[in-house]
């Protein structure tokens, strides 16, 4: 009699339908735009029915809000990966900017969504900029309360500086990289240009 083979104890957990729906929506909204991505297309991509999307999110607008909340949560997680006590105060803001940049590099769909949200003159992409601005204001206040942020400028001015620095770098660094690639033989890898975007006022 053949000996029974042991059953593997490794259990592969299936991604819950609600998260599959949000992930599919992010992909389609980022690549097509919200208006060009009907719920039926989201349902097909997520492997669910339109009825299940309505059950979890209600409307397409609510699904878009859930996508944007998920994007903001990624920013929050990246920022939180650099605790206040992790390095000297003068290096903290730059380290958090680098953590956000690394997160964006690892999540190209988030980048595509943000590009649409910021460069599209229509209002179809919702309020992600406002959500990120509120997150930045929260972070500025946290740094001020900890005594590691300057109070020379207003919170609003600092938020503008943070947002322009992070998102400007996001959109324009690829341009810098393409130009530098044309002169690859003339630029040492260790001296590859890195864009720094700032605001004066």
Image (spheres, helix red, strand yellow):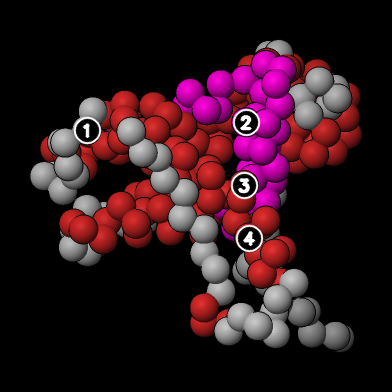
Specify which label sits upstream in the sequence, 3 or 1.
1
Would residue 86 be found to the left or right of residue 55 on screen? Answer: left
- The residue that mark 2 highlights is 118
Residue at (62% x, 31% y) in the render: 118
Specify which label sits upstream in the sequence, 1 or 4.
1
The answer to whether the residue labelled 1 contacts the one labelled 4, judged by CB atoms less than 8 Å apart, is: no
User: In this orientation, does residue 79 appear?
Assistant: yes
Specify which label sits upstream in the sequence, 2 or 3.
2
Residue 176 marker: 4
Q: Is residue 93 above or below residue 120?
A: below
Residue 153 marker: 1
Distance (Cα) linking label 2 and label 4 = 19 Å
Specify which label sits upstream in the sequence, 2 or 1.
2
Specify which label sits upstream in the sequence, 2 or 4.
2
Distance (Cα) linking label 2 and label 1 = 25 Å
- The residue that mark 3 highlights is 171
Distance (Cα) linking label 1 and label 4 = 30 Å
In the image, residue 107 lies in the stretch drawn in magenta? yes
Residue at (63% x, 37% y) in the render: 114
């Amino acid at each position: 009699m053949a000996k029974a083979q042991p059953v593997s104890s490794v259990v592969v957990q299936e991604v819950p339908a609600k998260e599959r729906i949000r992930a599919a929506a992010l992909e389609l909204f980022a690549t097509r735009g919200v208006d060009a991505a009907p719920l039926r297309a989201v349902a097909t991509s997520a492997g669910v029915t339109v009825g299940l999307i309505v059950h979890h999110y209600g409307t397409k607008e609510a699904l878009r809000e859930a996508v944007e909340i998920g994007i903001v949560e990624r920013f929050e997680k990246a920022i939180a990966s650099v605790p206040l006590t992790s390095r000297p105060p003068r290096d903290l803001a730059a380290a958090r900017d680098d953590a956000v940049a690394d997160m964006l590099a690892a999540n190209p769909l988030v980048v595509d969504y943000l590009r649409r949200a910021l460069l599209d003159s229509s209002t179809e992409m919702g309020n992600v900029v406002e959500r990120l601005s509120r997150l930045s204001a929260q972070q500025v206040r946290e740094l001020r309360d900890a005594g590691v942020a300057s109070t020379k400028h207003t919170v609003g001015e600092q938020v503008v500086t943070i947002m322009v620095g992070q998102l400007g770098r996001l959109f324009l660094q690829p341009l810098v990289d393409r130009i530098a690639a044309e002169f690859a033989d003339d630029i040492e890898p260790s001296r590859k240009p890195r864009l720094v975007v700032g605001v004066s006022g």
